[in-house]
Image: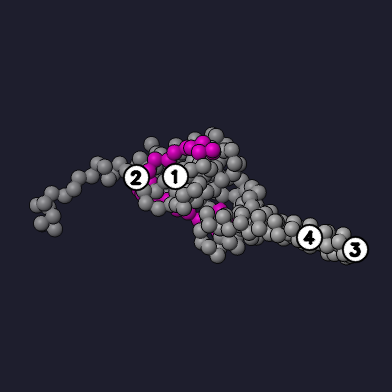
Amino acid sequence: MLSPADSSPPFTIPRRFHPGWSLLGRLLRRRTGDRLRAEALQIALLTGAALAGLMGVYAAEAAAGLFGMPSLALAGGLAGASLLAGLGAGVVGRRPRAVVRVGPQAVTVERGREQMRLLYDTMGPPAVVAARRFHRHERRYAAVRPFLGKTATPVLLLRAREGPIAALGLPDEEDRQALRRHVEERVEAAKAPREGAAWPSPARRREA
């Protein structure tokens, strides 16, 4: 059993390519304050921009052939190149690495300026779910804050009884099991004093 002063080494989730961390993705996330809404808006905006750009290029080429104006085709090509550059700003991004620290009172997850802290006495037991299940179900919940690596990696869920859920995509199986074990031991240790403590008798409460 771990003592309250024990502290495990930090666990790291490497940084990885992710469209949500592009310039457009970060802007939408700051504006909306909602991860799921920002993702939906980003997909809608990128899809609309791509369709509008393609239609514009085809229209310019058709007009150039119809009216015999090569400059229209050139303008359409330049517009298409500009569109691709703009779409790159909305797609290309790298998600920063996340560091998980298991402290004496809480587990802390840090990613860039983002920080999440879960106290052991407010947590339920951690659970591991398959990647497919997570992306189909848990990821859609607003309370879930994903700190993921590879898409196909199983996800460790750290749940508070009321509040956010940390979804940790540690790439290494041994690290995932070690983190789960450390958190389980501390959650059980935090529960033990409450479960063993007795409520004061009515007589003692009157004396107080």
| Residue 158 marker | 1
Q: Which residues are magenta?
A: 111-133
Residue 166 vs residue 182, the one in the foreground: 166
Sequence order check, earlier mark of 4 and 2: 4
> For the residue labelled by badge 2, is the local secondary structure a helix, a strand or a loop?
helix
Indicate which label's residue lies in the foreground, 1 or 4: 4
> For the residue labelled by badge 1, is the local secondary structure a helix, a strand or a loop?
strand
Indicate which label's residue lies in the foreground, 3 or 2: 3
Sequence order check, earlier mark of 4 and 3: 4
Please check the rendered image and state whether residue 126 is part of the magenta-colored stretch, yes or no: yes
**Residue shown at the point (52%, 54%) measured from the top left:** 36
Residue of label 4: 59
Residue of label 2: 190
Residue 13 vs residue 143, the one in the foreground: 143
Give the image quarter of residue 70: bottom right
Indicate which label's residue lies in the foreground, 2 or 1: 1
Sequence order check, earlier mark of 1 and 4: 4
x and y percent of residue 201 in the render? 13, 49
Sequence order check, earlier mark of 3 and 2: 3
How much space separates mark 1 and mark 3, taking CA atoms?
Answer: 65 Å
How much space separates mark 3 and mark 2, taking CA atoms?
Answer: 79 Å
**Residue shown at the point (53%, 43%) measured from the top left:** 135
| Residue 68 marker | 3
The number of numbered discs placed on residues in the rendered structure image is: 4
**Residue shown at the point (48%, 37%) measured from the top left:** 129
Q: Amino acid at mark 1?
A: Leu
| Residue 101 marker | none
